[in-house]
Image: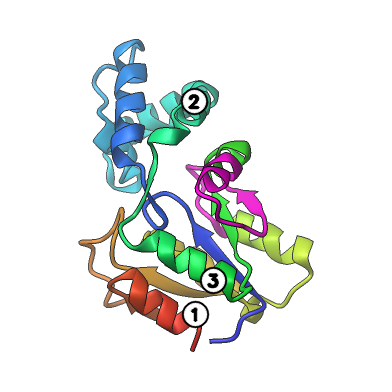
Amino acid sequence: MKYEHIIFDFNGTLVDSVEVINNILGGLITRSRFKSLTPKDFEKVGRLPFFKRLKVIIFSLKYQRKFLKLLAENVSLIKFASGVKPVLASLNQKNIPFSILSANDKDMIIEFFGLHRISIDSVYRSQRLLGKKNAIKKFIKQRRCAPNGVLYISDEVRDAAACARCGVDMIFVKWGIDANEDISGLNIKAAVGNPEELFALLTA
């Protein structure tokens, strides 16, 4: 598969950060007036009842900066998803560059990869609640590339719609946030069950 640009989602796709994120959210919720919320509510915001979804949005807007600061302070606790690091190291060895698109703090992501001695081309930020469409469009505009020259790799079902709207191909990885979701109707290039399958596609 030959693409000009490869973009990876971060949480779930490349790293297993659920425990760290839930611990931070749990602490923030406990000290807030939103005590009816739980960390689980932030995983599937679009499926929540209206008023609970509204609470999640308000909480996120109020505490986003604090959350990102705490996540950056705990970057050493974040781990690669099983089998992912060797794949990225092999991409480095083959001089295949890749970028990261995430709602997380850019400096935190750069520090994370620096700790693990993995080279990344660039990091782009998306808005946590708005999805990836605008961020992908911004990537295409800044890189001055054709949409069909971009491949996006993610573990989130909702990202498939964003990629389709942008004319970008997507590979869905069947681990991470939406590992147990039905993907039969998704508009995707391929789905892979483990990092080894992903590496085989990227280097075919």
Kind of residue at disc 1:
Leu
Q: Is residue 129 magenta?
A: yes
- Answer with left or right where residue 109 lies relative to residue 78: right
Q: Mark 2 vs mark 3: which is more N-terminal?
A: 2
Q: Tell me whether the residue at label 1 lies in contact with that at label 2, contact meaning CB atoms closer than 8 angstroms.
A: no
| Magenta stretch, residue numbers | 110-133
Q: Secondary structure at mark 1?
A: helix
Q: Which residue is mark 1?
A: 202
Q: Earlier in the sequence, mark 1 or mark 3?
A: 3
Query: Between marks 2 and 3, how big is the CA–CA gap?
Result: 28 Å
The CA span between labels 1 and 3 is 9 Å
Is 87 magenta? The answer is: no
Disc 1 + disc 3, Cβ < 8 Å = yes
Residue at position x 64%, y 51% in the image: 124
Task: State whether residue 140 is above or below residue 60.
Answer: below
Looking at the rendered structure, the secondary structure element under dot 3 is: helix
Instruction: Report which residue position mark 3 lands on.
Output: 91
- CA gap, disc 1 to disc 2? 33 Å
Disc 3 crowd, CA 10 A, few/some/many (<14, 14-19, 20+): some
**Amino acid at circle 2:** Glu
Instruction: Please name whichever residue, 131 or 155, is drawn nearer the observer in this view of the structure.
Output: 155
